[in-house]
Amino acid sequence: MREASAMRLLAYRDFSRKVHEEAASADRVIKAQLELTYRCNLHCLHCYTDPYNSREYFPRELTLNEILRLLDDMAELGILWLNLSGGEIFTHPNFFEIYEAAHRKGFLLQLYTNGTMFTEALIDRLKASPPFSIDISCHSVNEEGFDWFTKVPGSFKRFLQGMELLQESGLPFCFKTKAMSWNKDELPEIKRFVESFGQKFGYTTSLSPRLNGDCSSLAYRIAPEDVNAIEVMLTSPEIVEGEADDDDDCPLAEPDSDRLYRCGCGTSTIHINARGELGTCTLQYERRVSLRDYSLREAIQKVFSEVRGLRYRTDSPCKTCKILSFCDKKPTDARWEMGEAEAPIPYNCDVAMARGERALQRQLIHPLRIGESVSRVRA
Amino acid sequence: MKAKQAYIRPEIFRVELKPDQAVLSACSLATTALANGGMQWCRTNCKSHANMNMSDSGARPS
């Protein structure tokens, strides 16, 4: 066997790019997100899984044996990146049994956690089989706001203790923040907090209805004009310029198909929820198949083909929208919020307009008022 | 007739895992990253992880 030191070194970014490109050309699944459980020690007000974070729902979740069998199936399919998510992953009674089995199989493990459950013992065990990355949710850096939002007094203190332990451990981690109406004024402070750990600040403004269709989480959305202001304030300009240089696509163009999902849904990534239902994305619930009824391979084939086949059947403005590339709409969100997956979500239209006008430095016609503009021109 | 392709000997490389070099691809929510300026992201158009928006759904750096 060749010595590792004698082998040529390939930069991770080149390796990853190559794997992604090969998977795309061969139509192969290489990434999976597995929700281990809906259990969580917190009850964040925006959380899409929290409605099922209750004792009566846990018996429906995947068993340890079912999860271990799925790990075998995923490895056999050639999946490389495995994201373990929840709920809170560390509340799963068999977390380490699952984690270590996945590590032994060679997955590059990405962990999503709220960061409040780290102890020295837990970190030592992770260090013995290190993950590829750990993503920590960080929506506030003041005790009152944090504990109000999680509905658990003392959670902020535990979060801070966890972050100190994690920082000392040397394990790879980063933070992710939801910019919301209640924490928008705190964002510069959150950014400073994140950067004090030597991390880049990453955020999203997108919120979704909860998995049971409850739309109360949307009350925490930021006003569209504030989304724009925040993106201007928090986006580092040098990176945006660099990315724009290598891209020839015009962001203003009519969609080239009438597919309901014009993104990468149904290509290289799968999502498996805590009940063993397979989909193409965390928040895609238009088509799901139970892995209790189908093998992983069969389920992928069925769901991917159905999702790719979904088309706009109505004259929804989304079908021909030219500012699509600035829009956060997800069909399942639209179904919960507007009653129909094809329907535009006015909030998303407003945000897309604001982003588009900022990016292109010119006035655009609002996608929901295109008919009015045409009438004015004719008159 | 199709010409024979030259044989390329397989080579094993060493890769150091560096999450900060992760690329963004296979976007399940094509728009997640567009907030930064409206560029089209797609599965064959991998981008740097740097400064990306982090979301529950959609593109995850890998």
Image: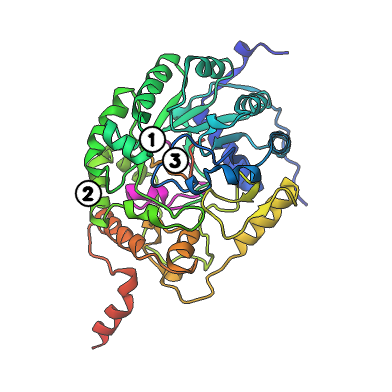
Residue beneath label 1, please?
A152
Q: Which SS does the magenta portion mostly show?
A: loop
Q: Residues within 10 Å of mark 2 (few under 14, many from 20)?
A: some
Left or right: A299 in relation to A250:
right
User: Circle 2 sits on which residue?
Assistant: A229
* Residue at x 34% of width, y 50% of height: B35
Q: Earlier in the sequence, mark 2 or mark 1?
A: 1
Chain designation of label 3: B
Q: Residue furthest right?
A: B1
Amino acid marked by disc 1: Val
Q: Which percent across, then down, holds residue A330?
A: 46, 58
Which residue is at a point 73% across and 13% down the rendered structure image?
A1
Residue A152 magenta: no
Please state which amino acid type lies under the numbered disc 2. Ala
Q: Position of residue A254 (x, y in %)?
A: 42, 67
Cα gap from disc 3 to disc 2, whole angstroms: 24 Å
Q: Is residue A368 left or right of residue A361?
A: right
Question: Mark 3 belongs to which amino acid?
Answer: Lys
Which is nearer the eye, A248 or A161?
A: A161
Regarding residue A32, the answer to whether it shows in the image is: yes
Mark nearest the camera among 3 and 2 is 2
Residue that numbered label 3 is attached to = B47
Q: Nearer the viewer, residue A61 or A299?
A: A61
Q: Magenta span covers which residues?
A: B30-50
Whether the residues at callouts 2 and 1 have beta carbons within 8 Å, the answer is no
The image quadrant of residue A364 is: bottom left
Q: Magenta stretch: residue B37 in it?
A: yes
